[in-house]
Amino acid sequence: MTSLEVKFKTDPLKFAANLQSPIGVYLRKELFKKESRADSALKKKLHDKIAAAQSSNGSWNQLFVTSANNLWDLRLLDYNAQDNVVRRGLEWLLSIQRYLYRGYPGFFNTDNRKDPSLMRSMLYGEFGPGCTIFYETTYAVHLFHIYGFSDNSQVKTTVNSYLQFWRPNWCGSWCNLNVLRMLIEHPLSR
């Protein structure tokens, strides 16, 4: 049996350890177990930059993708729902949960025509670009879960709707993966 040796131009662990981004802060804390004063300052700087771009309604430019990714970044930076920026972002997410899908309630959708193309141009977080309403809904439920709101009645409505109608043999692969990811994670569907 032969071994496959891979050589990189840059050490990927060193590269990850030096990222000046939310994922870099997260990796240094969780993977490398190295938190520093510099990371504390970077967390505040990144938080303030995200906060400055937040719209008065709690979204980021009425775009689901941008709003969800900023909430994801804030969680990577270890902010919780008591943070005003996070709280307002989560409230905005709940405000766009107003759609029925095949007669089932609880689906998230912004109706912003920029979201589908933005979603397809950006792979970030844990969800991939499938049908817009499935992408937005599963990503939103995931965000509520990681911020500790799995028991929220509106979130439970969404999960119950998926449990009643969804089958893993229809729609595209991204939609199936996004729904499965959300259902595996949420306590109600276990």
Image (cartoon, rainbow, N blue to C red):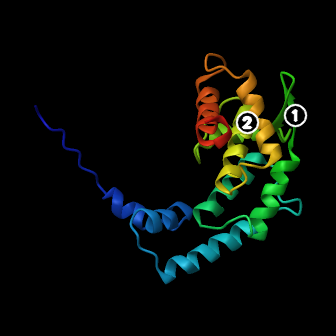
State whether residue 57 is above or below residue 35. Answer: above
Badge 1 amino acid = Tyr
Q: Nearer the viewer, residue 56 or 141?
A: 141
* Label at residue 159: 2
> Crowding near pointer 1: few (<14 within 10 Å), some, many (20+)?
some
Residue situated furthest bottom in the rendering:
37
Quadrant in which residue 115 is drawn: top right
What is the spatial separation of the Cα atoms under label 2 and label 1, in whole angstroms?
14 Å
Residue 79, x across and y down, in percent: 65, 67
> Considering the image in quadrants, where does the C terminus appear?
top right
5 relative to 107 in the view: left or right: left
Residue situated furthest top in the rendering:
169
* Label at residue 20: none
Q: Find out whether the residues at labels 2 and 1 contact each other: C-beta distance under 8 Å.
A: no
- Residue under the point 74% across and 38% down: 137
Residue 21, x across and y down, in percent: 54, 65
Q: Which marked residue is nearer to the observer: mark 2 or mark 1?
A: 2
- Residue under the point 64% across and 28% down: 175
- Residue under the point 84% across and 49% down: 94
Q: On the image, numbered disc 1 is attached to which residue?
A: 99
Tag 2 secondary structure: helix
Tag 1 secondary structure: strand
Q: Nearer the viewer, residue 17 or 147?
A: 147
> Considering the image in quadrants, where does the N terminus appear?
top left
Q: Nearer the viewer, residue 144 or 10?
A: 144
> Crowding near pointer 2: few (<14 within 10 Å), some, many (20+)?
many
For the question of whether residue 60 can be seen, the reply is no
Badge 2 amino acid = Val
Residue 180, x across and y down, in percent: 60, 32
Q: How many marks?
A: 2
